[in-house]
Image (cartoon, coloured by chain):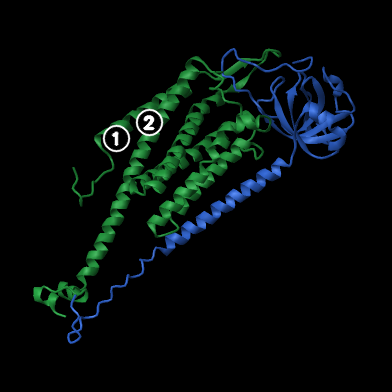
Amino acid sequence: MAGRDETPGTTGSRGSRLLGCVALASLGVLGVLAFVLTGPDVRIHPTTGEEFGQFDAVRMLYLHVPMAILMYASFLLCAVASVGVLVKRTPWWDVMAHSTAEVGTVLCGLVLVTGSIWGRPVWNTWWEWGDVRLMTTLVLFLLFAGYLALRGTTSDPRRQERQAAVVALVAVLDIPLVNRSVEWWENRTLHQRSTLEELKIEDLTLFTLMFGFLTFGLVVWWLTLQRFRVGWLERAAIDHAVGSAIAERRSETSAVELDAAIGVSDDPAGEESP
Amino acid sequence: MTDDAGSEPPSLDLTPRPARPAAGNRRGAIALLLLLVGGIIFVLLRTLGDASLFFYDVAEAVDLRSDLGDSRFRVVGTPQPGLLVTELDGASAVVFTLCADDVLADVVHLGDPAELFQAGVPVVLQGAWTAGRPPDMAGLPDAAGDGWYLRTDHMVVKHDNDYRSDGAELEPCGAGG
C-alpha cells in the first residue's frame, strides 16, 4: 500500500483492470448482438399489408437507449454527491460529483450524436428544433458542460466546490423534463413513448437492450472509478504543491530568524523576561 | 512572548504572496462558460421561436382553416394509400391524402419525401393551406376534394414505440387505413 507521501504510478488496481476487461468484452458481445444477431425492425402494416418499421436503423437504439439511461444515473449520482459537498464538505464528495458529471456529460454528448445518426434515416432529419426531448437533452448537455467550465473559473477550491454543487442541483431538475417529455408533450414530439414501460419489445431484441444496459453500466462504473482516482490524485498533487510551497517559503529564512520573528526563544528564561 | 525593544527582531514579511498566475486558464474557463450560457439562451430562443409554429392534427387544421389563412403550421396525420409523384411549379412533388380522426386533407409535398415515408405511417408536415385542387387529384383514391390542399415542404416521419415482430398498433384512419 502506498504511503502517505507516495503517489501510485497508475490509477488501476487488480479489481479495476478486471472490471475494464469485462466491460470491454461486454462491448464486443453487445456489438455482435446489436449488429449481427438481431434482425432489422421490419413489420407488416395491419391495413396496407406493406413492410414498415425502422429497418437497420433500429440497431443504433441498442447503444442510444442504454447510454441515455446511464447518463441519467451519472447525473443523479452527481446530484447526490453535490448534496454531500454542501452538507459534509469533504473532498470525497466533490471528487465524486466532478467525476460523475464528466462521465455523464460525455454520455450526454454521445446520446445526442447517436440519436442524430438514428434520426436521419428514421425521421428524415438530423435535428428537429421543435422536438421537446431533443431540446431538453441539449439544454442538459449545455448545463453540465457549464458545470465543468465553472470549475475552472475560480482558484478558491472551496468556493468552486460549493458553486459547482449548486449548479449541479439546478441542472438535474432538467432530467424529469427530458425523461417525461414524451408523455407530457406526446403530440409535440417526434420521440415515441417509452417502449419498456409498455413492454412493446420481446425476445432477442429485449435481451440485447437489457445486455446494453448491463454493458454500459460496467463501462460507466469503470470510467467513473478511473476518473475518481485521477481526481483524487489531482487533489493530492495540489495539496502536495501547497505543502511544498510552504516548505519553500519557510526555507527562505533561517529557523532562528523565523523564531525571532514570531517571538519564540530557545532560552526558557527569555520567556519570562518582560 | 518577548518584547525587547532593545533587540528588535528582524522584519519578516509574512503576508501571503499573490497566487501564481493561473489567469490564462481561468479566462478560458470564463469564456467557455459565457459561450455555454449563450448556447443555452440560443437554444431557448430557437425553441420558443419554433414553438410559435402551431402543431395540429388534420382534424384541427381543417377546423381552423379559415383562422389559419396562409400562415405556416405543423400538421400530423397518416398518409392514405395512393401516393402520386408529380410536378408543381417546376418542382417534383408528392400528392397524397392525410388523415386524422377520420378527417381527410389533400397534401402536395414539394421536394423529396422522407426515406421511410409510406401509406399508413404517420408523418409531421410543415406548410400552409392553399385554395384549389392539387395536381393529378383524380388519381387519389380517398381524396378529400374540398377545394383546399396543404402545400408542404418539410416532412418527418413519426414512428411508433412497438418493436415486436407482429406488433403494429397503428390506428386505422379513413377508408384506406
Q: Position of residue A137 (x, y in %)?
A: 56, 39
Q: Colour of chain A?
A: green
Q: Is residue B12 above or below residue A102?
A: below
The answer to whether one can see residue A267 in this image is: no
Q: Secondary structure at mark 2?
A: helix
Q: Chain of mark 1?
A: A
Q: Secondary structure at mark 1?
A: helix
For badge 2, the amino acid type reads Leu
On-image quarter of the C terminus of chain A: bottom left
Q: Is residue A32 above or below residue A48?
A: below
Horizontal arrangement in the rendering, residue A236 relative to residue B5 (left or right)? right
Asked if badge 2 and badge 1 are on a common chain, one would say yes
Q: Is residue A252 left or right of residue B82?
A: left
| Residue drawn at point x = 31 percent, y = 56 percent | A238
Viewer-proximal residue among B114 and B17: B17
Query: The N terminus of chain A appears in which quarter of the rendering?
Result: top left
Q: Please identify which colour was used for chain B in the image.
A: blue
Q: CA distance from mark 2 to mark 1?
A: 11 Å
Q: Which residue is mark 1?
A: A16
Task: Name the residue nearer the viewer: B78 or A29.
Answer: B78
Circle 2 sits on which residue?
Answer: A218
**B148 with respect to A8 (left or right):** right
Give the chain letter at badge 2.
A
Q: Is residue A229 above or below residue A209?
A: below
Image location (x, y in percent) of residue A54: 59, 23
| Image spot of residue A99 (x, y percent) | 39, 43
